Every structure is written in C-alpha cells, then in structure tokens.
Amino acid sequence: MCIVQILMIFIFYEAIKTDRENYLKYASESHEILEFLLNGNFYYLLINEPIWLLVNILMSNIFDIQYVPLVIGLISYLLSVNYVLKKVDKRYLLFIILLFFMPQIYKSFLVHLRQGLAIAVYLSSFLVEKRRNKYSLIMFSGLIHNSFIPILLVHIIYEYFLKKYSA
C-alpha cells in the first residue's frame, strides 16, 4: 500500500506543483489583494472570495508561506472527515477510514484548495443546529469559493419547498 501511495504522489506531483504556485501567491499577497478590494466596490469585494483571502492572511501570519496551502488542505480534509464520521452509519466506519487514507482523496483537497475548504465549511453547516449559524456557514462557503453562491440559493429554495409541502 505504501508503494502505491508513493507512486500516486509522483503521478499527481505536476498538478499539485502548478496549483501550489498559485496558492503560495495567495498566501503571500492576500493582504494586498484584500486591501485593494476594500478600496473598491463592495460588490466586487464579495465576488472575489473575501473569506478565502482572510483565511490566507490568518494562516500566513501563523505559518511560513510554504506551509499555508498544506495547512488549509489539511483543515479542509479534517473538517470533511469529521462530517462523514458523524453522519455515516457506524457499520461502514472501517471502510470510511480506509477511504480517507487513499492519497487521491487528500490530493484533491490540495489541488482544489478553495473548493475543498468551501465544501468542508458547507458540510460543517449540516452539523450545526441553530439555523442562523447554519446559514452563516453556508454563506461563508460562498465567500470562500464563488461556486457555492448558487448552492446557497438552491439550499434556501429547497428548504422553503420542503417546509411548505411536508407540513
């Protein structure tokens, strides 16, 4: 199994390396990008993923720039694992644990860093009981990656029709 994981790392290295350079740039320049956006149009700020910029600023203040993408990927991965472990039927626990040790799973969190973090925040919203906190997390996922803004709208519409027709 270890040999397979090592081979997978070499296979995925190019994809990780290309994206890594972009994420290192975010880690080192997010403060300047956010400052520029704050001096401009408020709506332009919202569509340029301000929570993603704030996460990079926070992480670059705590960790060396080289480790910021790795730490964000690890946090996203662990949040997603936490969600799955809390929601999955315990009969499948061993299978789920083995699944999360596959290098392809973690590689996806590293290559698609913003999307992975947005997914992890979105999934975490389902573990929250308070409606306000749940929608805040869903909204934050849209401010981490733009692709979650339509998901927020679909989620609201779904809950509206679910309540309307299930009563």
Image (cartoon, rainbow, N blue to C red):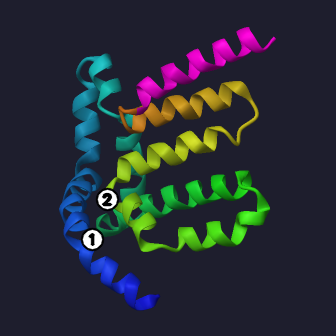
Prevailing SS of the magenta stretch: helix
| SS label for mark 2 | helix
The answer to which quarter of the image holds residue 33 is top left
The first of marks 1 and 2 along the sequence is: 1
Q: Position of residue 62 (x, y in %)?
A: 43, 62
The answer to which quarter of the image holds residue 81 is bottom right
Residue drawn at (26%, 34%), measured in percent from left and top? 35
Task: Answer yes or no: is residue 62 visible.
Answer: no
Q: Position of residue 26 (x, y in %)?
A: 26, 50
Q: Say which quadrant the C terminus sits in.
A: top right
In the displayed structure image, the side of residue 73 where residue 31 appears, left or right: left
Which residue is identified by label 2? 111
Q: Badges 1 and 2: C-beta atoms under 8 Å apart?
A: yes
| SS label for mark 1 | helix
What crowding class fits label 2: few (fewer than 14 Cα within 10 Å), some (14-19), or many (20 or more)? many
Task: Please determine whether, in this image, residue 136 is positioned above or below residue 96.
Answer: above
State the residue lying farthest toward the right. Answer: 167
Q: Position of residue 125 (x, y in %)?
A: 63, 38
Which residue is identified by label 1? 12
Q: Quick one: 156 or 51, which is closer to the camera?
A: 156
In the displayed structure image, the side of residue 5 where residue 99 appears, left or right: right
What crowding class fits label 1: few (fewer than 14 Cα within 10 Å), some (14-19), or many (20 or more)? some
Give the spatial CA distance, label 1 vs label 2: 9 Å
Q: Quick one: 145 or 42, which is closer to the camera?
A: 145
Residue drawn at (67%, 25%), measured in percent from left and top? 132
Q: Which residues are magenta?
A: 148-167
